[in-house]
Amino acid sequence: MMEIHIIRHGKTLANEKRLYCGQTDLPLSENGAKEIAQLKDRGIYPDSGAYFTSGLLRCEQTLDIIFGGVQREAVPGLAECRFGEFEMKSYEQLRERADYQAWINDETGNFECPGGESRKRFEKRAINAFKQIKEPAFVVCHGGAIAAIMEYLFPKTKNFYEWQPGPGRGYTLSCVFGKGYEYKKI
């Protein structure tokens, strides 16, 4: 059995403004950095021998606050969904667009954001990237990637949106032969 700790990065200004932020490489907000430091001080983060991030700045900064300048590997496939034309826009800015309505109401997961990717394509990318991790690890990535991974490892337990942890939160996963065995919230 192998343990992998997987958490969502801290808040960014895009999170605070409720904007779609997938591939835009934003830093943590001041509040986001403070919240991660407070969670660290509470001792909620288990240490590990290997460290991974999506490579985006908000994940790198989150890991630095928790564990300092530890050696890490970037796994770009763990990055958030590519939102294309919806990137850095809010629901309020997009709600009148027919393509946005088609995307948020798509039950198949096949509708691609204009210039972005579909939910199915994103989930496949995130799951394949996660499968590359073959050792006990601490992973800092994105809410959507974590939700896709959890839905894959623990099917029919919760829906995609129910799996998304808050900033700085996530799960400790016990995996056997690449399959989810059990999980605990971090």
Image (spheres, rainbow, N blue to C red):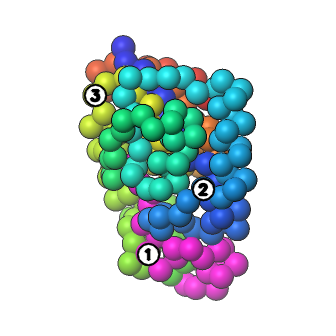
Residue at the image point whose x is 36% and y is 35% from the top: 71
Question: Disc 1 marks which residue?
Answer: 84
Residue 161 pos. (x, y %): 59, 49
Q: What is the span of residues highlighted in magenta in the rendered image?
A: 78-98
Label 2, residues with CA under 10 Å away: few <14, some 14-19, many ≥20: many
Horizontal side of 186 relative to 38 (left or right) equals: left
Q: Amino acid at mark 2?
A: Leu
Q: Is residue 83 magenta?
A: yes
Of marks 1 and 2, which one's residue comes earlier in the chain?
2
Question: Disc 2 marks which residue?
Answer: 28
| Helix, strand or loop under label 2 | loop
- Front position in the image: 67 or 86: 67
| Rendered view: 78 above or below 158 | below
| Rendered view: 166 above or below 98 | above
Task: Point out the frontmost of discs 1 and 2.
Answer: 2
Asked if marks 3 and 1 touch (Cβ < 8 Å), the reply is no
Residue at the image point whose x is 71% and y is 26% from the top: 42
| Helix, strand or loop under label 3 | loop
Residue at the image point whose x is 34% and y is 46% from the top: 74
Question: Disc 3 marks which residue?
Answer: 134
The picture quadrant where one finds residue 88 is bottom right
Q: Amino acid at mark 3?
A: Lys
